[in-house]
Amino acid sequence: MKINPLELNFTPLPGSTFTNLLRLLAQNKFRISIVGVPRTAYSLLLSALLSPLNIWEKIKFDKKIENVELKPPIFIIGHWRSGTTYLHNLLSQDKQFGYPSTFHTVVPSLFLNFEKWIKPIVEASLPPTRPEDNVPLAADLPQEEEYAMGNLCPYAFYNAWCFPKNMEFYYKFVCMENVESHVIKEWKEKYIYFLKKVAYHHKGKQLVLKNPANTARIKLLLEMFPEAKFIHIYRNPYHVFFSMKRDIEAEMSLYCVQKPKDDETIEKAMANLYIKMFEKYFREKELIPDGNLIEVRYEDFVSNPFKEIKRIYEGLKLKNFDKAKHVFLKFIEEQKKIKVHEYNISNEDKEKIYNYWNLTIDKWGYDI
């Protein structure tokens, strides 16, 4: 894994609250590798400079945020690299919905009052596409709220890619199993706070949220939002395996402030988390009320996205499909420019992946 220690733009840590950044460093006993020294110094400096603005925004808006009535969200779930971003971007074309943007998730503590000042800085630091593929990336485009959670509390998936020496520790906050009750309580409080803040920004609209980590948090989400709706998108596990490995290598090299573990350890941790996620999802999806869950096969979705988005609206009884269909068709046409990676899978790789993930391969009936 090639790491440029002077590549500072992509690390998510500078947008963290200063208190949270100190907690993360303490959680890792301040163990920073040589490659992480510039990123840590940059993150501490920027977070400290922004801290007074964070406090001012809390003083000005927290009472208003507290009074926001959240409508039951629509959660897009499914493992990373399974089409969740495409689905999120498509559904967010419907103006009846709100969503967290990249800007909101990068600086979750000051996007209401200081957009005019801070957003240009965020925009300047973003490339036109994501580092792992050629999907567009911009400050106002929809983004997964897990990034915001990592900047608000030390219990989020992407902290594992910033602090890879402690990778397995942060991965456990996906399934939230064997986690102390005070941690779950804090996570819920921060999560609801962030969603209310986003809803306030969108003038109370129903939120469409995309977060792969939530695939294993159904019970927690239903405790907070009993009437929430869920869209689960799943993809050929053989393809997910290679796509996720490429994603981790691309993003961890940009996020980390510690030298990553060896490739085999990273691969096994990825494979184990996948299984834990889906074992928990298959158990907990039975808790979702009838009519509030729809499942989408990635291959069906990319071959005919308009048909599948219409099926989602009908299955979840979402309103105003006819009003939004013209923007859906326009967006779908634009996505045809995006190229999907192809993989050559050897028999040895196929056997290894099957041994890891036969649970979903058999359940969903996939082959290479």
Image: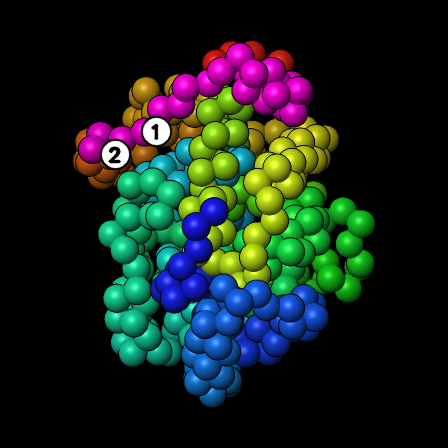
Percent position of residue 272, x then y: 67, 35
Nearest the camera: 270 or 334?
Answer: 270
Q: Is residue 299 above or below residue 123?
A: above
Q: Is residue 122 above or below residue 282?
A: below
Nearest the camera: 333 or 264?
Answer: 264
Residue tagged 1: 341
Residue tagged 2: 338
- Whether the magenta-drawn stretch holds residue 347 is answered as yes
Q: Residue at x 80, y 49 (%)?
A: 178
For the residue carrying disc 1, how many other residues have a C-alpha within 10 Å: few (<14), some (14-19), or many (20+)?
A: few
Amino acid on which disc 2 is placed: Ile
Q: Is residue 328 above or below residue 16?
A: above
Seen in the image, is 290 located left or right of residue 247?
Answer: right
Percent position of residue 186, x then y: 69, 65
Percent position of residue 140, x then y: 30, 58
- Whether the magenta-drawn stretch holds residue 346 is answered as yes
